[in-house]
Amino acid sequence: MLWGQSRIPRAPIPAVGSPVFQLRFKDGPAGAVVNATAIRVHGLNCGRFKRGRWYRLPASLRGLTAGLQPRSLNARVPRSC
């Protein structure tokens, strides 16, 4: 999904306050914000993703955050590509 040529399905914008996780580079900035069903990429593969858009998270990646503590989505999500 993050790499390749296939079309990436869009996802609705999650509600403010919904649980999210940040994917971060080691000792660096966040690379994406992820909720249960969607991902917003910033700083990763910028030619493939558009600024400010959420994309559907593939079923194969859902559930990877089980047991982790989410953060709350606030209105100020870092800028994407």
Image (tube, rainbow, N blue to C red):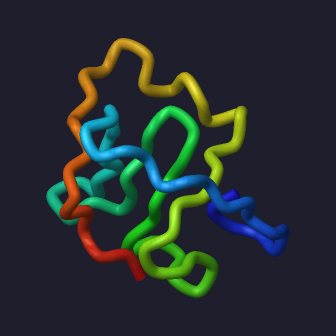
Give the quarter of the figure containing the N terminus.
bottom right
- Of 21 and 12, nearer the camera is 12
Toward the bottom, the furthest residue is: 47
**Which quarter of the rendered picture does the C terminus lie within?**
bottom left
Q: Residue 15, percent across and down? A: 37, 44
**Relative to 80, 58 lies left or right:** right
Which of the 4 image quadrants contains residue 31?
A: bottom left
Which residue is nearer to you in this view: 22 or 13?
Answer: 13
Image location (x, y in percent) of residue 63: 55, 23
> Which residue occupies 43% across, 47% down?
14
Q: Residue furthest left?
A: 27
Q: Position of residue 19 (x, y in %)?
A: 32, 32
Which residue shows up at 39% across the image and 71% down it?
A: 42
How many circles with numbers are drawn on the protein? 0
Splitting the image into 4 quarters, where does residue 58 fall? top right
User: Quick check: 76 above or below 80?
Assistant: above
Q: Is residue 19 left or right of residue 6?
A: left
Write the residue at 25% across / 62% down.
Answer: 77
- Residue lying at the far front in this picture: please name it: 15
Residue 72 place in picture, x, y as percent: 22, 37
Instruction: Place residue 30 in its image quadrant.
Output: bottom left
Identify the residue shown where x is 52% and y is 61%: 54
Single out the residue that lies furthest toward the top: 67
